[in-house]
Amino acid sequence: MNTDELLTQASAALSLSLDDRQCSLFGAYQRALLSINESLNLTATTDDTEFTVRHIIDSIAAHRYFTASRAILDVGSGGGLPGIPLAILFPQARVTLCESKAKKANALSSMVRELSLSNVHVAHSNVFELRDRFDTITARAFGELSKLADILHRVGTAKARAVCYKGKRETIDGEMAKMNGSLYTAVVDAVTVPFLAEERHIVVLTKRHQGH
């Protein structure tokens, strides 16, 4: 199956309704990233089908955690995952792609311009230097939950959440054991990613005593 066919079937399985523009943007994003990837090595996945499943569909499989988001921060965005797929899926949300490495940040800016994603901002910055505040912080393959909890505390609004893309439950349990449970609550949900036969979870972190 090509990218369009995979997205059509995956969106049906996920109860998502994608319009033609969104499908076109997902395809354009994949082509742009794989083209830039030849010189920057942003992803080890270079097969079109595998990329669609492992990165785009994996990113949007967690869509229900972002439906109310208005200001999303993608930490350590790298090649724009999951931030760019989420921005395509939720054009009403403002998405900031934070990337500390200049070459990657420049590549992200180039892709955002190419795709004309007016709701996306690229921040070439250390995440703790950001002055904006976000209602949703997210990351894929960025760091342990304790690190994301610290970012949530520093740049999140009072009622912000961190939506963390994770793999195996065993790894999550190990990371949660290192967190300060008196400061944060963590909810772990198993997520089924169409066409991907691997263990996937979303961990949602929230601050305790919100607003204090």
Image: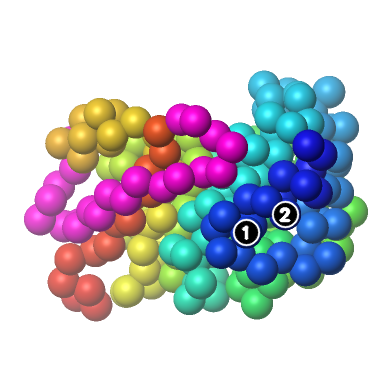
Task: Kindly identify which residue carries mark 1.
Answer: 12
Identify the disc placed on residue 40: none
The answer to whether one can see residue 83 in this image is: no
Could you tell me residue 186's position as x and y percent? 23, 53
Name the residue located 22 percent from the left edge and 74 percent from the top edge. 210
Give the position of the N terminus as an image quadrant: top right
Q: Which residues are magenta?
A: 178-198
The residue nearer to you, when weighing 104 against 138, is 138
The residue nearer to you, when weighing 57 against 147, is 57
Q: Would you place residue 191 above or below residue 177 in this image?
A: below
Name the residue located 61 percent from the left edge and 73 percent from the top edge. 93
* Quarter residue 137 falls in: bottom left
Indicate whether residue 192 is drawn in magenta.
yes
Residue type, mark 2 in image: Thr
Question: What is the CA distance from the residue labelled 2 to the residue labelled 1?
Answer: 6 Å
Q: Main secondary structure of the magenta part?
A: loop
Could you tell me residue 80's position as x and y percent? 67, 46
Task: Kindly identify which residue carries mark 2.
Answer: 8
CB atoms of marks 2 and 1 within 8 Å = yes
Give the residue furthest to the left. 182
